[in-house]
Amino acid sequence: MPQAHRTSTSSKIGRRAFLFLIGFAGSTLLAEWLSVWQNRQRLYALLNQGIVWLEPHIGLTLPKILVTTATSTVPPVIPSPTPVASPSPVATPSPVASPSPVAPPVRKPVEVQLKTLAGVQFYQTTIDLNDPENLLTIGLANNASQANSAVATNGDEAFAPMVQRHQAAVVANGTFFSKDAQKRVMGNLVAGGKILKYSRWENHGTTLGITANRELEMITAKVDGKPEWNQHWFSLTCGPRLLKQGKVWLAPKSEGFTDPHVLDRGYRTAIGFPASRKQLYLVSFLASLSLQQEAEIMQGLGCVEAMNLDGGASMGLAYRGDVLIAPGRNLTNVIVVYDAQSPAPLALKQAWMAFEQGVRPEYPS
């Protein structure tokens, strides 16, 4: 091979080798430089600036390079703060366990549902006593402050104006009353932490009571002894008793009931509660029933304690102002239930707070 040709070939090989080495070294340095997250972001930013500059010259919209957040395990360099003299050591107090957060009460407004059980249709009102907004009281005819008795009477009143006056979630018939001119309410009554009617000789029927902490109790005087009415926030005496400790319990004559309208079949209202003693079921039946049938349906609804209320022509039920069952006669007393959607009057709420703080009803002298 001629000398000049060999020299030219050797020069080409040398240049290629040199360029290869330069390229290899450059790519290695570039790869190392790009391994730092901040450097990559700077390069991406420069490229995006170039794209933005180029777009109006070529008349096209080019895709941008996404500038991502840091994913590298190498943390960004943060300048160290100027060292400050450490304060004298102070004894570290022992850690104190933080109190467990208290969950707010679950709000369960009063519900009225149309149901059927054992072929019988009825309205079931469910009152959840876990909800502090759900409060029960007694409404009296003509807005009286004391229930009718042998001593004094305020007569009776049509159901519709009573519903209108209370503006409650539910208004329903309460306990029995006499048919004479006095319209005497049967049994002792307590509402709003006040005794509305009291006789120390009262020992008939069954009493539903709400005590402190919204606890429910049901007491049949002839069997369990007299209730402590001065420990009740709400107390209604009626009957006969239907359930006791989860079992059908019917002894109406021993409770003092002799009226055939109570003992025979009829349209009925019942009230009771399950084993938790935190829900109250008020049931308005839309069919004529015996006491046995009434007791079995209340048992089927999950009640462990239940009693009969006034019924027949006295049966009435209103839900948020709408009358679902209109009584066939005027009434002397009604059960009134408030909730968050139909709130109780301020005076009733304050009375409940006072009751929870230990204020109790006083027996009349």
Image (cartoon, rainbow, N blue to C red):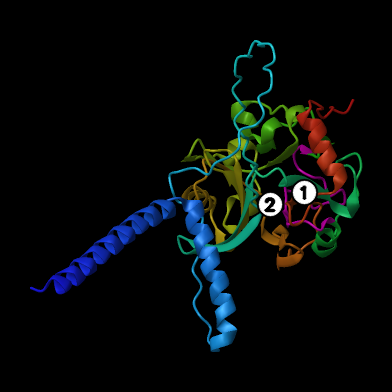
Q: In the drawing, does residue 137 fall left or right of residue 82? A: right
From the top left corner, tell me how far across and down residue 299 is, in percent.
49, 47
Q: Position of residue 131 (x, y in %)?
A: 67, 45
How far is the residue under mark 1 from the one under mark 2?
9 Å
For label 2, the crowd category at 10 Å Cα-Cα, with few meaning under 14, some 14 to 19 and many 20 or more, is many
* Residue at 67 percent of width and 28 percent of height: 82
State the quadrant of the C terminus: top right
Q: Amino acid at mark 2?
A: Asp
Q: Residue furthest left?
A: 1
Q: Residue at x 13, y 70 (%)?
A: 3
Residue 148 shows up from this direction: no
What is the span of residues highlighted in magenta in the rendered image?
A: 166-190
Q: Secondary structure at mark 1?
A: loop
Asked if the magenta segment contains residue 184, the reply would be yes
- Residue in view at x 81 percent, y 42 percent: 349
What residue occupies the far front of the structure in this picture? Answer: 3
Residue 63, numbered circle: none
Task: Answer left or right for 25 relative to 221.
Answer: left
Tell me residue 61's x, y (percent): 53, 83
Q: Check if mark 1's residue and mark 2's residue have beta carbons within 8 Å.
A: yes
From the viewer's perspective, tell me whether residue 354 is left or right of residue 92.
Answer: right
Three-letter amino acid code at disc 1? Answer: Phe
Identify residue for label 2.
310
The image shows residue 92, relative to residue 51, as above or below, that is above
Quadrant of res 307: top right
Q: Which residue is mark 1?
A: 177
Q: Is residue 216 above or below residue 179?
A: above
365 or 19: nearer the viewer = 19
**Compared to 171, does 136 lie above or below?**
above
Q: Is residue 21 magenta?
A: no
